[in-house]
Structures are given as structure tokens and as C-alpha cells.
Image (spheres, rainbow, N blue to C red):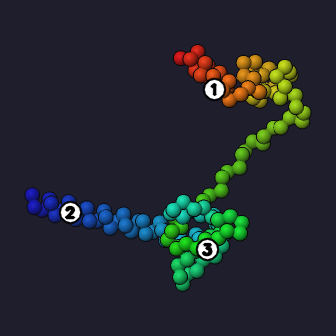
Amino acid sequence: MTILLFVMLGVFVFMMFRRNKKTQQQQAELQSKFGPGVEVMTSFGLFGRIVEIDEAENKVLLELSPGNTATVHRQAVTKIVEPAAAATEPTVVPDDASSLTLGKTDATVDGVEGAAPAAETPRNETPDETLRRLNDEGRKDS
């Protein structure tokens, strides 16, 4: 019974050291990717672009917005922000305002050529009317 307790304690200590080592490796890999121009996020939620890294002082100069900079400790930078992927399909914009009129049947609505806009959703209603209409539609559906 005592041997089992020591084995369990040994496994626990081993797992603790292993997790610590893995975290240090991830942090070192992240730190190696740092360089001027990289978009990052700090541990306290600030997003910015690295302008300068001071290796001797372990400081990073971040540009938060054009003309605004902040100096943070290197370990405060916890994540590299990947740029959002661009849309694969271009947005189609009509040449004229025919799709904006309610009475036209040859307009493009939701990507369907020749579809008439829904008559029950007027485009110039007040917020109260919109709320009332949406609540009424919810009652009809359920």
C-alpha cells in the first residue's frame, strides 16, 4: 500500500514537471517569433504591433494605434494575432438602385435573380414597429 502511494506521488510530480517544461517550450517558441511589425496581444488584452524589442531590459515597444505606443514587459506579450482571412467570394454590388426598391420584381434579392423583396418587411419602419413585427413573427412560428 505504501509503495502504491509513493508511485502515485512520483507520477504526480513527473506530470507537474512535464507540464511546466511544455509551457516553457511554448513560451520560448512564441518569443522566437517576435519581431518588429508582428501583431500581438498582451496578457491584459491590449492589441498592438511590435515596433521595437529591447533584449537587455526585456521590454517591448508596442504601437497600439498610429502615434500611440506603450512599453510592456516581454512576458506580457502572450499571443501573436493572425490576420483575418480575406473573403474568398467578392461581394456583388448592383450598378443601380433597382435592388433597393420594394416594387421591382426584376431585382436581385439575396442573390436570387428575379425574386421580389418580401412585402411584409418594410425598410422604413421605426424601431418600435420592427420590435413589434419581430415579436409577432416569433409567436406565429411557435
Residue 112 rendering spot, x and y as whole percentages: 78, 26
Depicted 109 relative to depicted 90: above or below: above
The mark nearer the N terminus, 1 or 3, is 3
Task: Give the side of residue 107 with respect to residue 136, left or right.
Answer: right
Res. 55 visible in picture: yes
96 up-or-down from 12: above or below: above
Name the residue furthest top.
140
The quarter holding residue 90 reads top right
| Residues under numbered marks 1 and 3 in contact, where contact means CB atoms less than 8 Å apart | no
The residue under label 1 is 131
* Mark 3 nearby-residue class (10 Å; few <14, some 14–19, many ≥20): some
Residue 40: percent from left, percent from top: 59, 64
The kind of residue on which mark 2 rests is Leu
Rendering quarter of residue 110: top right
Which residue sits at x=73%, y=26%? 125
* Left or right for 102, reference 75: right
Q: Residue at x 77, y 27 (%)?
A: 124
User: What element does badge 2 sit on?
Assistant: helix
Residue 32 location, quadrant: bottom right
Q: Judge depth for marks 1 and 3 and give the one in front.
A: 1
Q: As shown in the figure, which amino acid type bears the numbered disc 3?
A: Leu
Q: CA distance from mark 1 to mark 2?
A: 61 Å
**Residue drawn at (71%, 28%), measured in percent from left and top?**
126
Name the front one of labels 2 and 3.
3
Q: Earlier in the sequence, mark 2 or mark 3?
A: 2
Check residue 9 in the rendering and tell me which mark sits there, or answer none: 2
